Amino acid sequence: NRYEGGEDAWGLVKKLEPPDPAGGAAFGTAVLLDGDRAYVSAPGEPWLVLPVGAVHVFERHMGGADNWGHKQRIVPDTVQPGLAFGTFIAAEEELLLVNAPGYDEAGDDGAPGLGALIGFVRDSASLFHETRFVRGDALVDQVSVRPCVSSWLAVFADQVVHASYFGALSFPAPPFAE
């Protein structure tokens, strides 16, 4: 009930937390509510001791009426330190897009990478699986933009909108479903 604490007052309904909280994970950097599903990113969360990042999926009514239960922890198939996976998230129906601005195709060469946009598709059990990985240089070739920390990302039907201090661009969503 959104009127916890009185009719015209907002109150705490549920505190969302990752199953294994980690210091420096930056849990809650990006939050997206989509019906009875909530996506919460933690771009500094460790995976196999590397600060890779994660996106946590919570579903309403999981574990009881009006309860928000933890459904899934999403990490990318490609693991690099400093990936910052989950800096920005966007969802549209069965598709989840996650920005990984720290992705570096050249590895640890000291130069900044171009980042990546990673697509996930939800299966019949409501779990997300990585389906497509688009390197930042491919996005640069297509739309003259790169995933970066100081921007936002959104999906509308078959269009991806990326905005930063350079301006806003809209382009067709990469073909994530293979």
Image (cartoon, helix red, strand yellow):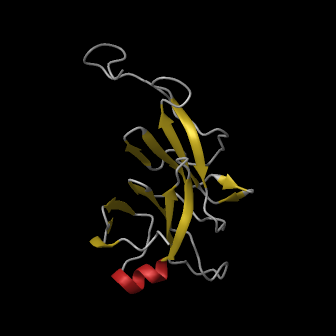
Q: Name the foreground residue: 122 vs 167.
A: 122
The residue shown at (55%, 47%) is: 125
Q: Position of residue 123 (x, y in %)?
A: 53, 54
Instruction: Indicate the quadrant where residue 107 lies.
Output: bottom right
The residue shown at (57%, 59%) is: 129
Q: Position of residue 92 (x, y in %)?
A: 37, 55
Q: Residue furthest right?
A: 48
Locate the N terminus and report the quarter of the image it occupies.
top left
Asked if residue 13 is positioned above or below residue 103 in the image, the reply reads above
Asked if residue 25 is positioned above or below residue 12 in the image, the reply reads below
Q: Is residue 13 visible?
A: yes
Q: Position of residue 90 (x, y in %)?
A: 40, 57
Left or right: 11 as drawn, with respect to 19: left
The residue shown at (55%, 78%) is: 112
Q: Residue furthest front?
A: 124
Left or right: 173 as drawn, with respect to 127: left
The residue shown at (49%, 44%) is: 28
Asked if residue 62 is positioned above or below residue 37 in the image, the reply reads above
Q: Residue furthest bottom?
A: 141
Left or right: 6 as drawn, with respect to 130: left
